[in-house]
Image (cartoon, helix red, strand yellow):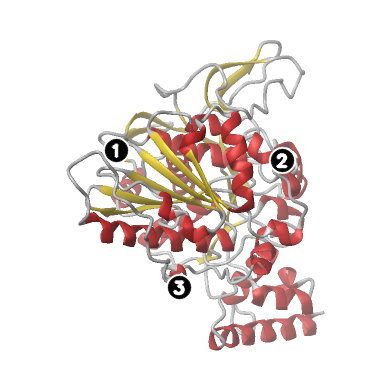
Amino acid sequence: MKFRFFIALIMAKLSIPALKLTGHNATDFPGKVALKICPDFLKYVAKPEKIIAVTGTNGKTSTANLIIDMLKRFGVTTLNNSRGSNINTGISTALLNGVSILNKEKYDTAVLEMDERSAARLFPHVRPDYMIVTNLSRDSIMRNAHPEYIRWLLEKYVPEKTKLILNADDLMSCYMLPNNERVYFGIEQLATDTVKCRNLIDDLQICPKCDHKLKYEYRRYSNVGRAHCVNCDFGSPKYDYSAANVDYDSMKFTLRGPDFEIELPIIDDRLVNLYNETALITLLLQLGYTIDEIKAQLGTVEVVKTRFNHETVGSMKVYNVLGKGLNAFAESRVYETIVAQPGDKELIMFINDLGMAAHWSENVSWIYDTDFETLNVDSIKKIVVFGDRGLDYRLRMLFAGIPEEKIVHVMKADDAIKQVDIQPDMNYYVLYGADPGSFALGNKQAKALAAMLREKTAKLVETDEPVETAEEEPVPEGSGADEVQIEAETVEKAGEEAQS
């Protein structure tokens, strides 16, 4: 088997320059080659002395990137899969990049984002020293079924020696693997928290210990909050490290630990990233860095820009927003974030699950778990949807009570940006999915929209009337899509990546 492993290692490494020469950007193809030749490749490939894993339904990519950036600032160069996939083929690609042709490890530390659904393939051979579980919530029903099933998978395969860093506010994941050493992070009660669930997804109403009703002290969204059982001792665990006094005006918060309380900068104004930041700090403290060392570097890191960045055109802004098609929980958080932003807004949605139609049976049930009702507010002036899936969105929005005149449907993606009303101070949100086709399309159209706004800005008049856009030029071929690092040339490719 060792002979087969070395053949796999050599052939996989040779595939990397070959891919570059042919202009391909496959993120896990070398790992596919290695596993095809040697199915036990992950067993034999050398690994760094320290392995940090990040998993969970939402937030793992952002959290892993934050860890990589912070460790770099502390002088630690990590082996990571930030440019690859998070399943066994992507992990294999990262690990083979980290060894010599003789299988000698080049790195001391690895930071690996790991798909929670791939636990059975990864954890028998990749044994993390630390593992952050950001949260467990509903994801694609076709792939992940229910979060309790995902928790069962992790509990079955995660090594008992792995130290867990868990979200104390997520009752779905905080008590997993009871025999493992653990440390808890979370965010203390916020002014915006409520007692009653405001979301369609409410997966934890019954005590998992005695089957009686849970009572929530407060909820942040769905089952994220603080609760206890009215019949037994089950309840949210105590924080080891918690964010308090959260002030988005000053972009500061207080971190409370066992023996300190310190003011720290908020690195991003979205709640989900405050959770990610708190998880990051908790990990760094476990690695031996002091809170003062961490504070000195926090202000220098930022959340990956492909997920929520914007371009300003005069008084208008164009936002690129990564949503998650098929994931109602995550998509609902995106809508909450958008609605919470100041000013009037128009949404252009390119979340069309482009790869699903090619490989899977279509399933739109997740749309009816998503809180489209959140978008039924005065500040949302128009929502543009496109394609066959756009008709499903339109129907769901009508059920949510969104006025019909606010919803515009077009069949062609290039026609979508032509439907916006160009108004001073307007905020345009271009939403796209994580599958390659949607990702590239959304980024391309966001760039095209910004270009169109720049061209039309000179025509704005000092009235409330929008500028006519009917004679808009076709979107330039490749405008912006060539800068996206994910290939999306065919629906076939999109389907392959979406399934993984």
Q: Is the residue under label 1 in contact with that under label 2 (CB below 8 Å)?
A: no
Q: Please indicate whether residue 59 sits to the left or right of residue 429 in the image.
A: right
N-terminal of the pair, mark 1 or mark 3, is 1
Name the residue nearer the viewer: 215 or 257. Answer: 215
Q: Which residue is drawn at 78% across and 71% down?
A: 40
N-terminal of the pair, mark 2 or mark 1, is 2
What x and y, as percent, mark residue 471?
37, 60
Any part of residue 371 in sight = no
Name the residue nearer the viewer: 186 or 406. Answer: 406
Q: Is 292 located above or below residue 261 in the figure?
A: below
**Residue bearing mark 2:** 151
Q: Is the residue under label 3 in contact with that under label 1 (CB below 8 Å)?
A: no
Find residue 251 and name its label.
1
Camera-nearest label, 1 or 3: 3
Q: Is 21 located above or below residue 187 in the figure?
A: below
Q: Please indicate whether residue 249 sits to the left or right of residue 496 in the image.
A: left
In the rendered image, the quadrant that contains the C terminus is bottom right
Within 10 angstroms of label 2, few (less than 14), some, or many (20 or more) residues?
Answer: many
What x and y, as percent, mark residue 178?
69, 35
Q: Which residue is drawn at 64% across and 34% down?
A: 369
Report, in whole angstroms, how far the alpha carbon at label 2 lies from the one at label 3.
44 Å
Q: Quadrant of residue 105?
A: bottom right
Name the residue nearer the viewer: 121 or 350. Answer: 350
Residue type pointed to by label 2: Arg
Report, in whole angstroms, how far the alpha carbon at label 2 lies from the one at label 1.
34 Å
N-terminal of the pair, mark 2 or mark 3, is 2
Within 10 angstroms of label 3, few (less than 14), some, or many (20 or more) residues?
Answer: few
Q: Residue at x 44, y 44 (%)?
A: 347
**Residue bearing mark 3:** 477
Camera-nearest label, 2 or 3: 3
